[in-house]
Amino acid sequence: MGYNHLTTVKLAVAAALEPLMPTDPDTGQAIPLDYAWPGPDLKRSTHAWLANGRTVSTPGSLSAGRKRRDQQVSFDVVIECVLVGETVDTEGRNILQQVADARVEEVAGIVDQYVADNPLLGQSQAGDVPIDYATFDSFALSSGPLADGVGSTGVCQITYRIRPK
């Protein structure tokens, strides 16, 4: 089986994105970005982490010995915002949900820009991964009421391609 370098690339992306995270208005600190799910008891209203890796491989040229193959590897960046408080304004509009969705979308925009502007996505202290290209494939936003406020979760999918030489 070929090696997809998923952990190396996720570590490089986490390290590169961490200093780019915006300030959380509730705490005055940068929104944290972790390599993995930080657990259910989040200490801040907005948090992001990397998750869910997938690999698709297709055979390349047929030659003697090991077959070469192209690999497309994807993983998710999950962004969660939970805001507690009154959800509607005096006119009955759910402004708290708008705020939560906007925070999630702001972080997703940073992830999108980082992937689009960075030709060295797989470069890290852990090792260099020979990536042909990387894309910000998709973004899904889920939001809705909670018992004492609102929640918003965004999932960004990053895909990169490794093609053996």
Image (spheres, rainbow, N blue to C red):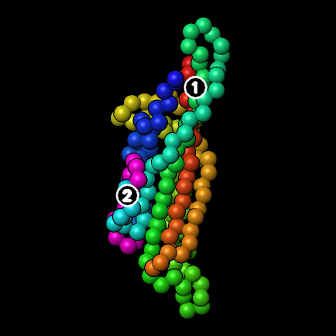
| Residue carrying label 1 | 163
Q: Nearer the viewer, residue 99 or 149?
A: 149
Q: Which mark is residue 35?
A: none
| Position above or below: 38 against 6 | below
Q: Which mark is residue 39?
A: 2
- Residue pictured at 52% horizontal, 24% vertical: 2
Rendered image quadrant of residue 94 = bottom right
Segment tinted magenta in the rendering: 25-37
Q: Quadrant of residue 140?
A: bottom right
Residue 147 part of the magenta-drawn span:
no
Residue 156 percent across, percent down from the top left: 55, 52
SS under mark 1: loop
Q: Is residue 142 above or below residue 52?
A: below
Which residue type carries mark 1? Answer: Arg
Q: Secondary structure at mark 2?
A: loop
In the rendered picture of this protein, how many numbered marks are placed on residues? 2
Q: Residue furthest top?
A: 64
Q: Indicate which disc, 1 or 2, sits on the residue closer to the N terminus.
A: 2
Where does the image place residue 118, in percent across and percent down from the top left?
A: 51, 42
In the rendered structure, the answer to whether residue 15 lies left or right of residue 145 reads: left
Picture residue at 56% right of the left edge, 35% below the top? 55
Identify residue type, mark 2: Gly
